[in-house]
Amino acid sequence: MNTKEHQLKALIAKGEGLDIEFKACRDQLPKSVYETLCAFLNRHGGALLLGVLDDGVIQGIEPDAVAQIRKDFVTAINNPQKISPPTYLAVDEIRVGGKPLLHIYVPESSQVHRCNGRIYDRNEDGDFDITDNTALVAALYQRKQATYSENRIFPHLGLDDLDRDLIAKCRKIATIRWEDHPWKDLDDLELLKSAQLHQTSPDSGASGITLAGILLLGKQLPLLNTLPYHRTDLILRKVNLDRYDDRDFVDVNLVESYERMMAFIHKHLPDPFYLEGTMSISIRDAIFREVASNLLIHREYTNAFPAKLIIEYGQVRTENSSRPHGFGRLDPETFTPFPKNPVIAKFFRQIGRADELGSGMRKMMKYSRAYGGADPELIEGDVFRILIKVPEFSEKKASETRKVPGKHPASTGQVTGQVTGQVTGQVTGQVTGQVINLLKVTQGEQSRNALMESMGLKGRDNFEKLYLRPALEAELLEMTIPDKPNSRLQKYRLTEKGKAIVENQQ
């Protein structure tokens, strides 16, 4: 019995309660699943198990129906007509006793959610509709506002305090990722409201940009006027242990902070060659994408403690203020993530800067062993800490490794001492090897198929995910018909930034 199956059996043995709900689900979703989902979001979160009867008997889901049930569930929770505001959840298929079940971890939300226009809350007996009970609805709103500081409203802040170009960039990235993304046809204010970055207080009726809004998209001066102590300290300390060898003092909005953090990581950490199946991937980026987003998303921003990312010999450690839900070392294998700032986390997912809750942590766990030879350490408390072991490759060692007879750097799933070429500069420091290879073969204006043929690639989905989309999001490639992303006549060409990277590689 594997670890996940054992954990799920223990969860089922506890029986239904405030934070556990079973749903029979042979070949289609029961309608009540969405009311339970809404109640979990509004209360303290919980675990939803599909394929289990009310008395805990494991009935399972018809194997042929699992994929469609997952698809129907994900589609519905992203539909504002069903769940408003929409939410994003990971759905895990786990077999218990050979029977497939679906396990859905539902975090507590910082928003008040509705299901089919109704507000549901949770008690020991199940889900109950509180829509028409004014006192209960008011208490729910007050609890959300008091618990999650990201929802604090600043009526004096307006659109002029935000970076409008950055809003346009985020809209563009989101619509490249999902053609029918709702932000596509929204103006800036409507986008902010859709993302819960502009809210109206149910108590006072005051409207304005929220703390999450100014943190994510604010211009530097209004942001620091609102949160004077806001900063993330990036430090390289390997030679000068008393001070530092390099440092970036980051006090800009979170979207730009993420880019600065990844540039610093690319500048100072090696990116070993790694094959997953037949595809070369950057495990450094997979790990530190999660580390960077965790440092920004799960911080308690009402606390003046400065966040830090410190690169030392053989390891990277981070510190950020937290609102702990426990204390001590966490087991990444069994760790259940709790979203400290769900609105900020959701925005990061929209623009591809974070994975679904829990999936990024699993990637960090998986690739850390290959990258630095050890599991990551996560320690929760008033200050949340992460420790990642990293390789220390010298060019001499890399050269020697490449010369070892019989050792080929393309062994599946293995990291070698071969460090890929590190691209210098803040812009190029954020570019993966796959994207650089794409830029190198781009000549004039070329179709998607022509680019794939030039690179010897056949997998359309992998090309989209690992090559084309990142190049478009980084504004290194551009579409010849940007208003019609899926046009059959669509072609792609290098931007000036893309040309500069290609020239730097030559």
Image: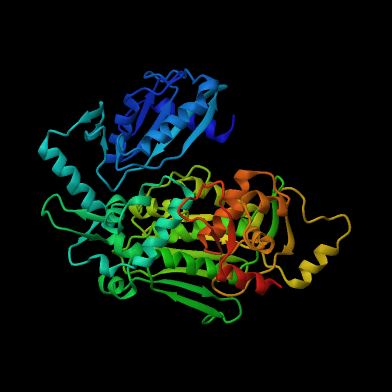
- Residue 93 lies, in percent from the top left, at 52, 31
Look at the image and tell me whether residue 43 can be seen. Answer: no
Total residue callouts: 0
Which of these two is toward me, 403 or 183?
183
Which of these two is toward me, 412 or 383?
412
- Residue 56 lies, in percent from the top left, at 41, 20
- Quadrant where the N terminus sits is top right
Going by the image, does 151 lie left or right of 365?
left
Which of these two is toward me, 398 or 425?
425
State which quadrant residue 273 falls in: bottom right
| Residue reaching furthest to the right | 405
Query: Which residue is rendered at x = 36% and y = 42% of the image?
Result: 87
Query: Which residue is rendered at x = 20% and y = 47% of the image?
Result: 143
| Residue reaching furthest to the front | 489
State which quadrant residue 393 falls in: bottom right
Going by the image, does 246 lie left or right of 251?
right
Query: Which residue is rendered at x = 24% and y = 31% of the image?
Result: 123
Which of these two is toward me, 419 or 335?
419
Going by the image, does 54 lie left or right of 502?
left
Going by the image, does 55 lie left or right of 202?
right
- Residue 32 lies, in percent from the top left, at 32, 25
